[in-house]
Each structure stands twice: as C-alpha cells, then as structure tokens.
Image: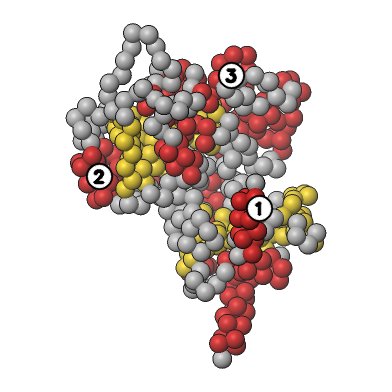
Amino acid sequence: MQVVKEYIQRVDENGLLPDEYVCYARQGNLVDIEEAATSTRRTVLTFCTNDVLGLVQNKAVQQAAIDAIMQYGTSNSSTGPLSGRIDLHRQLEREISAFKHLPYTQLFLNAWMAMQALMDAFCHLAIPVPGFQNTRETLILTDVLNHGCIVSALANAGNRSGKLFSHSPRVRIRAYRHCDMEDFARKLKRYARPDDRIMVVSDAVFSMDGDIAPLPDMIDILSNYDGSVLVMDEAHASGALGASGGGIYEHFGLLPQQAIERGISPLIMTTFSKFAASAGAAISSHVAELIPLLNCSPTSIGTISLPAPTTAAALESIRQVRQHPELVQRLQENTKYLRALLLEHEFDAIGETNVIPVILPPEINPKYFARKLMHDHGIWVSPIWFIAKPRLRITANALHTKDEIDRLVAGMAEVRDAIYNKTTTISA
C-alpha cells in the first residue's frame, strides 16, 4: 500500500483531490452543507444537482417509497432471477416501455452494470448452451466522449464477465470522433465485414459537453447495415429532451419504430438517478428474446435486485413526468434563459441542454473559481479539472427561478472579475 500512500500524497499536494461536502438537509435548491476540510456549515443555492425535474422531494414520490418499504421492506434480499423479483419491478418495466415506445425492458442496479450486461448478452450470449455455437464476430463503434459506464463495459467486452478468457468470437471496438458523422460513416465502411454483428453505442446527451448525439444522421448511415444495433444512453436525455421528456427520439420527432423499419434494432438505456429521483437503470428493446438473455447475465444473477423503495420512487417519478409535461417545459425554459444570460455576460457555455459546461481560460483554476463562488456568493457549482478540459459544470433544473439564475450569473461575473483583477495586479 506504500505506492498508494505516496500517490495520494502527491495528488493532494498538486490540488487534484475534490473538495468534499456533506449534506445535512435540502429544501428545493437550497442545501445545508458542511465543508469537510474546515467543518464550516452554510446554506447554499445549488446548480450542481442532477435532480433535473425537482422530483426528489416530490410528496407523491416520497410516499411511494415509504409505502414500498412498508409492503416489501428495505431490500428484496436476493437476485431477480432467483427470489428477488417483486411486482413493482414489473410495473416499472411496463412504465418505462410505454415511456420509451419499446415493449420489453430489463432493470439493473445502475448504468455500469446495465452496460456490462448488454456486452455479455450481445457479444457472448451470456451463458454457453450445449449444441449452440455463434461464429459471428462483433464490431462495436463508440463515440470518443461516451460516458465512463460505456467505456468500462467496452474495455471488458472481449470477455464475458467472470471469465478471464473467452471462447466467443472476437469483439472489435473502434472509436469515432465526437458526433462526427463523416468519421462515423468512414469507420463503418473501413471496419465492417460482411458477417459482422454491428453495434453502435452513444450517449444521447453528453454529460461533460451538454450536446446531443445526431440521431437522425446515425440512423441514416446505419440503415445501410441491415440488422445493426443502435444503443442510446439516455441518462441525461430522459425527462429533459422532447416536449414530454421522452428523450432523444422525441427531441428529433422520431419513434424507435422508424429505426426498426429501416433494419436497425434500437436499444435505449434509461437511468433513474437524474430525472426519476432514484437510482438504477433499464435497457429497453423491441426484441423479446433479449430480456431473458440480460436476465441471466452475470450482473443480474450475481447481484441484488433493485430495492423496493428505489423501484417505487422511480416508478412514481416516471408517472409524474408523463402526467405533468409542464415540468419538462419549465426545465427547458430555465435552460434557455440561463444559457442566454451566460452568453450575454460573455461566458463560453458550450452544448445545448440543461447540462451547461462553462469553459474557463487555462490560467483559471476551476476549483478555485467554484470555491470562491460558494464562499462569497453562497452558490454551489461543480468544478471539472482533470477528467475534461477545465470548466464549470452547471445544471439547470425545473425548480430554479429566474431570480436564482440571475444570482448565479451575477455571482460568476463578480468572481471572474475578481480573479482577473488579482491576476492583473500580480502580473504588473
């Protein structure tokens, strides 16, 4: 462990460790937190929560979770395929299927496990069956800026989970430039072989850049590869894109059925940690046979099923979204207003969604900027300083008021001016 100790010491000395905060209470977007390093407590206005529709404190969602605990307890105490499946799981799967317009859905504890299960199921067919042999190789194309859950699953796609060596046909993985459809088409043409099983995986909304995958163009290109599979990770798209929050297909005025009619198998991963006030994930498909395959993957049979209160909270959240599209409209209005205000104050806000990365000049430390914004103005945003180009990651949600958004941008402008004045003074 000596290497670990020395490494963390060096990381700390270089200011690379994140600032740690502990939450005590929350009311709307006001959060009572403690700064772990100093034990200082303060109430701050948050712009760094992924509770995009404000459903975490929704009374109906809270009551659904409480009722589920009273009926089922706090845990199902088993895996789904054995004895851990409850009726709430079936209800949630049906609700997601209706929401995403794909009839079959399988639940998972989180997106990382869902993606790994998909790789096991698609590339290796999950479990060996006597007398059945797959001889077709798999080609997977991935956007270079895809989320870590996708990257991790692809890094392990060559072998089925739990097996160091695999006897399945080879899996070949190729990356294409971020949202670059010319490069995407070029890579497909270069690497696809006649008998390949082709899968393309992409974020719908990219979590660090806030932009949207060009879904119509992807479908156009993939229609030349009959039987190909298109996986959209809708973690930041569900509840945020489309008039009713249906996600990327609704945003572009499409239905998954239109991809199916062009010879493409659409898969959608829905996660509950953003719009659905809970935790967990699901994969939806129009192919019934995929569900039992996912269900017997190592990440399903080797892990506890989604707990009842978590399931109930996600279920009620999705029902709230479907019943109250005005929540989505409010989120989109706040996003538009905040982005326009940042532009007016000459901040470099990239992307187009409620995930709003503000790129900072290289001489400005994002951690220092965020810390000063909190200490001087009581506003909490996320600094990004090592996993992407230095930036502030701001998230708008449906509960923010215009006054709160005004306060955020005014505070950011003051911090920027203070930092630049200090830099100018030092230089002089």
Q: Residue at x 42, y 53 (%)?
A: 211
- Residue 384 seen anywhere in this rendered image of the structure: yes
Real-space CA distance between mark 1 and mark 3, rounded to the nearest whole angstrom: 40 Å
Q: Residue at x 39, y 25 (%)?
A: 166
Q: Earlier in the sequence, mark 2 or mark 1?
A: 1
Q: Amino acid at mark 3?
A: Gly
- In the image, taking residue 251 as reference, residue 170 lies left or right, namely left
Please state, as top left, top right, bottom left or bottom right, where the C terminus lies in the image: bottom right
Q: Earlier in the sequence, mark 1 or mark 3?
A: 1
Badge 1 element: helix
From the image, tell me which residue sits under label 3: 80
Local packing at callout 1 (Cα closer than 10 Å; few below 14, some 14-19, many 20+) is few
Q: Amino acid at mark 1?
A: Lys
Q: Residue at x 32, y 52 (%)?
A: 177
Q: Quadrant of residue 78?
A: top right
The location of residue 402, given as percent across then percent down, is 61, 62
Q: Where is 228 relative to 331, above or below?
A: above
Q: Amino acid at mark 2?
A: Lys
From the image, tell me which residue sits under label 2: 187
Question: Which residue is at the front of the view, 253 or 84?
Answer: 84
Real-space CA distance between mark 2 and mark 1, rounded to the nearest whole angstrom: 43 Å
- In the image, taking residue 199 as reference, residue 400 lies left or right, namely right
